[in-house]
């Protein structure tokens, strides 16, 4: 059951696709207080209650014990003290004495205090929102109902499930060729090479530096023939530069965000002075999306959208104030307090709330402060590209994913989880974040494998790949100041070859499960307690996940670990993928210590299920998914359904083949 309550005058987010009538009276379970234009929900939790959801957030699968903000925010320091990340995904499920879901549909900040102020209190605060309450017989039933409410998840082309290599620092065509040669000579599979901001001319969107990339179209066509696609980045900010066609046309048509007087609002981003497309204006949104044609004509079929929270380095007002503070301290003895004042003047420049408040959109015929709709920006920018693709070729699927997002964008593209670091804790965070993202509809998701910032190590990279082979978006990405972490640069190439090859062997299963989950509104990654809600031990396990219908994952996420403890909530078969084959072992319900060498991958096959495998391939184009073998834990003939689409068109996604598997 879904019940909807409205507070104030919420801006239409387009997150919901199913019409739900407004409910009168008070919402269930909560004490509601309305004052000063805001709303506070309070719910008393029982000791056994867990709270799941919030999509892209820090900490565990169970969000109890911390406070979180639904507020899209760019800050690369992803520590446990963070209360918000790049996306705003305001959906939670309370699981315990009562089980129910809550979605706060709101374009501005929403706060969730989940046992932080008071260990037994859930407190949600917001203003101007539609709030949806969902009840059902289980967490999975509630999630399915919510996913039906917000619409079907985006399904990329099949090649997008291959492995991609990225780095901020591939500055020219020769760098791209070097990466390709490195993977080819090491006999490591590869499907994509990503282009970060280095390919642009003066950091201008939809331009190419012709000195560094003299023939991008030829390069893209050459690599595509080899089974590898080039994936360029697109940033939100447009450089202020007369003669730059995107800027000139946007100014002429009034398609950029403005100040309160209607003049283009200038902020500082990669190019320096920049303006932001007013993507809440449908015409401006489609206009910006149409510029992706510049790359489509060059044979590019995939994109990653960045800096679209929107991230700003400074606003003109805040940087002027900072310089005034510094000028006033010239010649002054900088004691502790005075030095902190100077430091704070510049430390508070980036993504300053005052700068956001001074920026305006033209929406529904009037100017509206960006602060009222901040969470929607990354969503609507990515949506603009998807809408243009659909208009250009309604049946074709393109790769499109974004850093910032709001629930609803899951229909148009995927996400990566932003600027993580080469920390073991961020590998563990990657594991814990996947089911929360699935709950909010973001099935095509993944983290920067090996870590974006800092310097990775061979063992961390191998362990991260050993989990990354299961995530739909699989990309190795690092910043320009980090050590080179392409897989061919490490010592034990055999281990990397084995683990990456396993991704392609598993791809028929991953792809089929992904498509089925997207179409049915189900989760690809599930915590153990979602399947075993009565198992008290399962509720405490946060580093094991069910993956699709057949498999349980138990990745190693600690440094120098030779293995790990695993909890089996039911009888399962251990599958150990070694360089020399697969070893199998049936194990009863219980707790076990499992050895997991760095060059092996261990998973668990559920009883009554099968796991299809293909032969290794160097890329998706060369993958033979018609001749499959099956690993089995069955005693009678079982059926498994494989997606048999063409990998490119939307209409072919209805093509499935049911295969009978004998014991």
Image (cartoon, rainbow, N blue to C red):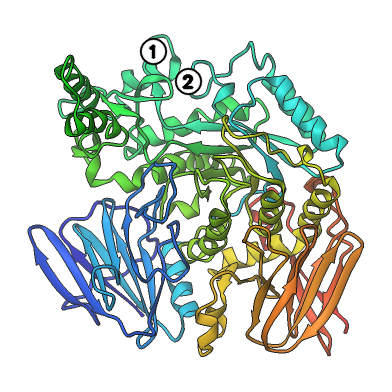
Q: Is residue 493 left or right of residue 414?
A: right
CA separation in Å, label 2 and label 1: 9 Å
Q: Are marks 2 and 1 in contact (CB under 8 Å)?
A: yes
Upstream in the sequence, badge 2 or badge 1?
A: 2
Instruction: Locate the N terminus and report the quarter of the image it occupies.
Output: bottom left
Q: Which residue is mark 2?
A: 204
Residue in the foreground of this view, choosing between 98 and 574: 574
SS of the residue at dot 1? Answer: loop
Q: Report the front residue among 398 and 260.
A: 260
Quadrant containing the C terminus in the rendered view = bottom right
| Circle 1 residues within 10 Å: few <14, some 14–19, many ≥20 | some
Q: Is residue 410 above or below residue 561?
A: above
Local packing at callout 2 (Cα closer than 10 Å; few below 14, some 14-19, many 20+) is many
Of residues 290 and 308, the one nearer the viewer is 308
Residue at numbered disc 1: 241
- Examine the rendered structure and indicate whether residue 437 appears above or below residue 494: below
Q: Residue 23 location, x and y as percent?
A: 22, 75
Tell me which corner region of the image, top left, top right, bottom left or bottom right, holds residue 128: bottom left
Residue 369 sits above or below residue 426 on the image: above
Q: Position of residue 184 (x, y in %)?
A: 84, 36
| Residue at the image point whose x is 66% and y is 54% from the top | 464
């Amino acid at each position: 059951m879904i019940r909807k309550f409205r507070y104030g005058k919420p801006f239409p987010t387009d997150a919901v696709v199913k019409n739900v009538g407004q409910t009168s009276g008070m919402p269930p379970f909560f004490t509601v207080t309305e004052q000063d234009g805001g709303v506070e929900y309070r719910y008393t939790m029982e000791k056994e209650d867990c709270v799941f959801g919030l999509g892209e957030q820090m900490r565990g699968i169970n969000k109890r014990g911390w406070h979180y903000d639904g507020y899209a925010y760019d800050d690369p320091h992803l520590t446990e003290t963070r209360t918000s990340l790049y996306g705003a995904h305001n959906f939670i499920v309370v699981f315990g004495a009562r089980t129910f879901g809550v979605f706060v549909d709101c374009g501005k900040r929403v706060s969730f205090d989940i046992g932080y102020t008071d260990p037994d209190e859930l407190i949600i605060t917001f203003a101007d929102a539609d709030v949806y309450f969902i009840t059902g017989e289980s967490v999975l039933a509630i999630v399915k109902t919510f996913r039906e409410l917000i619409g079907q998840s985006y399904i990329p082309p099949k090649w997008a499930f291959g492995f991609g290599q990225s780095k901020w620092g591939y500055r020219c065509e020769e760098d791209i060729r070097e990466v390709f040669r490195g993977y080819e000579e090491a006999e490591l599979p590869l499907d994509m090479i990503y282009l970060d901001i280095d390919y642009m001319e003066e950091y201008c969107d939809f331009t190419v530096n012709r000195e560094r990339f003299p023939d991008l179209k030829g390069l893209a066509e050459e690599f595509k023939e080899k089974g590898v696609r080039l994936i360029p980045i697109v940033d939100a900010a447009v450089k202020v530069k007369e003669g730059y066609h995107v800027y000139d046309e946007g100014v002429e048509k009034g398609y950029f965000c403005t100040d309160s007087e209607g003049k283009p609002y200038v902020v500082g981003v990669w190019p320096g002075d920049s303006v932001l497309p007013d993507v809440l204006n449908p015409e401006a949104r489609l206009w910006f999306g149409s510029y992706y044609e510049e790359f489509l004509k060059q044979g590019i079929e995939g994109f990653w959208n960045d800096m679209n929270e929107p991230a700003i380095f400074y606003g003109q007002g805040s940087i002027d104030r900072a310089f005034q503070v510094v000028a006033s301290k010239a010649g002054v003895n900088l004691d502790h307090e005075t030095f902190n004042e100077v430091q704070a003047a510049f430390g508070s420049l980036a993504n300053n709330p005052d700068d956001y408040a001074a920026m305006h959109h033209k929406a529904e015929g009037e100017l509206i402060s960006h602060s009222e709709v901040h969470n929607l920006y990354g969503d609507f920018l990515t949506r603009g590209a998807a809408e243009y693709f659909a208009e250009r070729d309604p049946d074709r699927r393109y790769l499109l994913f974004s850093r910032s997002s709001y629930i609803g964008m899951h229909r148009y593209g995927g996400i990566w989880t932003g600027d993580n670091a080469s920390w073991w804790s961020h590998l563990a965070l990657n594991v814990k974040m996947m089911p929360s993202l699935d709950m909010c509809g973001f099935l095509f998701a993944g983290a920067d494998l090996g870590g974006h910032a800092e310097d990775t190590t061979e063992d961390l990279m191998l362990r991260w790949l050993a989990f990354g082979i299961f995530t739909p978006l699989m990309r190795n990405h690092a910043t320009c100041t980090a050590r080179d972490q392409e897989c061919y640069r490490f010592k034990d190439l055999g281990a990397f070859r084995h683990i990456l090859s396993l991704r392609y062997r598993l791809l028929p299963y991953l792809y089929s499960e992904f498509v089925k989950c997207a179409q049915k509104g189900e989760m690809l990654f599930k915590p153990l307690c979602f399947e075993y809600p009565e198992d008290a031990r399962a509720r405490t396990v946060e580093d094991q996940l069910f993956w699709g219908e057949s498999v349980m994952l138990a990745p190693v996420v600690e440094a120098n670990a030779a293995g790990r403890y695993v909890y089996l909530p039911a009888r399962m078969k251990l599958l150990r993928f070694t360089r020399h084959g697969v070893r199998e072992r049936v194990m009863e319900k219980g707790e076990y210590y499992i050895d997991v060498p760095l060059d092996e991958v261990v998973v668990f096959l559920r009883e009554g299920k099968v796991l299809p495998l293909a032969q290794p391939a160097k890329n998706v184009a060369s993958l033979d998914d018609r001749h499959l073998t099956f690993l089995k834990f069955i005693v009678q003939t079982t059926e498994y359904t494989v997606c048999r689409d063409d990998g490119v068109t939307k209409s072919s996604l209805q093509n499935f083949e049911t295969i009978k598997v004998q014991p």
